[in-house]
Amino acid sequence: MDSTAARDLFAPLDLEQGLHLLDSLTWFPEGEEDRWPHVADYVARNVTPSPRPDPADCRSAAERVVAAAGAPAPAGELRGRWLDVPDAKALYRIKYDLMTLLYPDDWFVFMNMGHQPAHRARTVVDPAAPVEQMVWRYATQLYDLVAGMVRLRAKDVLEVGCGRGGGAAFIARQHHPRTLVGLDYSSDNVAFCARVHRSAGLEFRQGDAEDLPFPDGGFDAVVNIESAHCYPHVDRFFAEARRVLRPGGHLLFADEWWAVDKDGLLSKVAAAGLRVLDEEDITEGVIRALEELPSYVEKLLEGLPDGAKKRAYSRFFHERVCRESAHSYLSGRFVFLRLLAVRDD
């Protein structure tokens, strides 16, 4: 997506407001009579330099986005939750393509929450590293926690939902698989990854998690971190993960999940023919990471020149991640689960 097309899509909202508009479609159910004023308030709370958008402008922009996704809702029936919006995957693709415009810097390589255990974590980022790397300490620790559930050395690994590629590059560098393919639905993410992360055995491809573009039995491990909650039909992904795994291959999974459906996630994995070997609620560790992250963010911001970009990154980390995301867990609405499953045959 280029900047001109994006601005036309969200006008009169600016691009940062457009990003939070896309988020708001998840949080404000269609049945609320005052949904669009709530959406306008949410956007204004997260994009403080801009005036509060008119609720009618929020609605018209949302309807254009749904139409651009290729499956417009019936007139007057724009639905509010991702699973109820036509072609939710296409809407997520617009969201992450938009993020590449808003946060284009090469150091911006993670989008996951991160994790900090109660005990001292294994050092996965050099304390002397540039602050642009240190800000991803907790995100890297989450990847290390998940990747460390099985031995990946000399194995063929697929990461589904690789985002900006920081996790895939870390696994390739620290866990030494023979090959690692990072797959993402956003072609802009894939282009970013291919440009920024270059090492032997590491490649990136565009594709659909619910219809993986790989032959049967091609991988020893499938990694999926903080991505599956975006899939309209997560059961299809689990079935596809099993299909592309070799017998004895593992699914390494971590994601936020609706607290009321915690057991349902395990049931879906089992129904796909994968046997769960281990599972853990790591929500407290995610909350600790979000509580500690601001100290690194402040160091990062000190090194950025004053201006719109610095302010945008400040809002991204402080408000979007550390405040809004933390609230999702502290409120009890979401839990963050880690699990390991195996394909037995």
Image: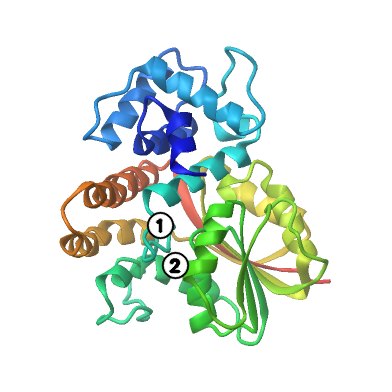
Q: Amino acid at mark 2?
A: Leu
Graded by Cα atoms within 10 Å as few (under 14), some (14 to 19) or many (20 or more), the crowding at tag 2 reads many
State whether residue 115 is above or below residue 78.
Answer: below
Q: In the visual, does 293 lie left or right of 6? A: left
State whether residue 304 is above or below residue 7.
Answer: below
Residue at position x 42%, y 32% from top?
A: 21
Locate the C terminus and report the quarter of the image it occupies. bottom right
Q: In the visual, does 293 lie left or right of 108? A: left
Distance Cα–Cα, label 1 vs label 2: 8 Å
Q: Amino acid at mark 1?
A: Met
Q: Position of residue 171 (x, y in %)?
A: 52, 76
**Which image quarter: residue 289?**
bottom left
Residue at position x 65%, y 30% from top?
A: 86
Residue at position x 77%, y 64% from top?
A: 214
83, 341: nearer the viewer: 83
Specify the farthest residue to the front: 4
State whether residue 132 is above or below residue 66.
Answer: below
105, 59: nearer the viewer: 105
Q: Please, what secondary structure does the residue beneath circle 1 have?
A: loop
Q: Please, what secondary structure does the residue beneath circle 2 have?
A: helix
Label 2, on which residue?
142
Label 1, on which residue?
113
Residue at position x 61%, y 40% from top?
A: 90
> Residues at badges 1 and 2 in contact (C-beta under 8 Å)?
yes
